[in-house]
Amino acid sequence: MPVTAEELMDEPDFIDAEADIDEVKEEFAGTENTLIVREDGEVKGEIHENSLLKDVIPQDRIDEEKVIGVLGLSFDQSYVAEKAKDLMKKHEVTVPPDETLGEIAFLMDREDIRSIPVEKEGETIGVVHENKVVQEA
């Protein structure tokens, strides 16, 4: 029988999209290195601990192309983040508790995400982190 999301999931660590950066830093003290960002009760994205590295990079060391893109047509808000929503990687991918390991790995790769919330009847009941997927593979 295939391994499912329910077997792989951990308790989710949530943070509100409007939380300030200091709150985000505090929340990382007891997490599995991923925070699930919610706004009005809905999952909007995820923040990884390494996203906070941008907050401590000296201004003169920031690569301009990373911030505004090669053509100058985009802007990476995470370099000047004030709130959790500025740091998060947006995604709307969730899985049901019975989703299989292979499908979870496929979704993580396709969406370029490191965790997937597990939802049951519209409520987030857990989160599957990439390290659990790799360990089970």
Image (cartoon, helix red, strand yellow):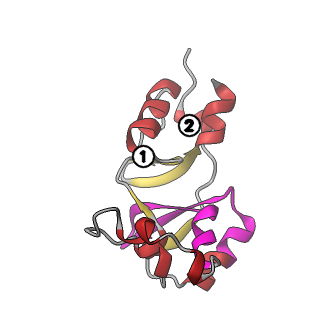
Q: Is residue 15 left or right of residue 121?
A: right
Q: Is residue 44 magenta?
A: yes
Q: Does the magenta stretch include residue 117?
A: no
Furthest residue in direction right, as rendered: 29
Q: In this view, does 123 lie above or below 9?
A: below
Q: Is residue 33 above or below residue 19?
A: above
Which residue is drawn at the image coordinates 63% and 70% (left, top)?
53
Closer to us: 79 or 32:
79
Q: Dot 1 corresponds to which residue?
A: 120
Mark found first going from the N terminus, 1 or 2: 2
Q: In this view, does 130 lie to the left or right of 105?
A: right
- As helix, strand or loop, the secondary structure at mark 2 comes to helix
Query: Pointer 1 and pointer 2: residues touching (CB < 8 Å)?
Result: no
Q: Quadrant of residue 1?
A: top right
Counting other residues with Cα less than 10 Å from the Cα at mark 2, is it few (<14), some (14-19), or many (20 or more)?
some
Distance from disc 1 to disc 2, alpha carbons, whole Å, reads: 10 Å
Q: Position of residue 44 (x, y in %)?
A: 38, 63
Q: Dot 2 corresponds to which residue?
A: 6
Which residue is drawn at the image coordinates 57% and 66% (left, top)?
51
Q: Is residue 108 above or below residue 101?
A: below
- As helix, strand or loop, the secondary structure at mark 1 comes to strand
Q: Position of residue 66 (x, y in %)?
A: 44, 65
Q: Is residue 136 left or right of residue 76?
A: right
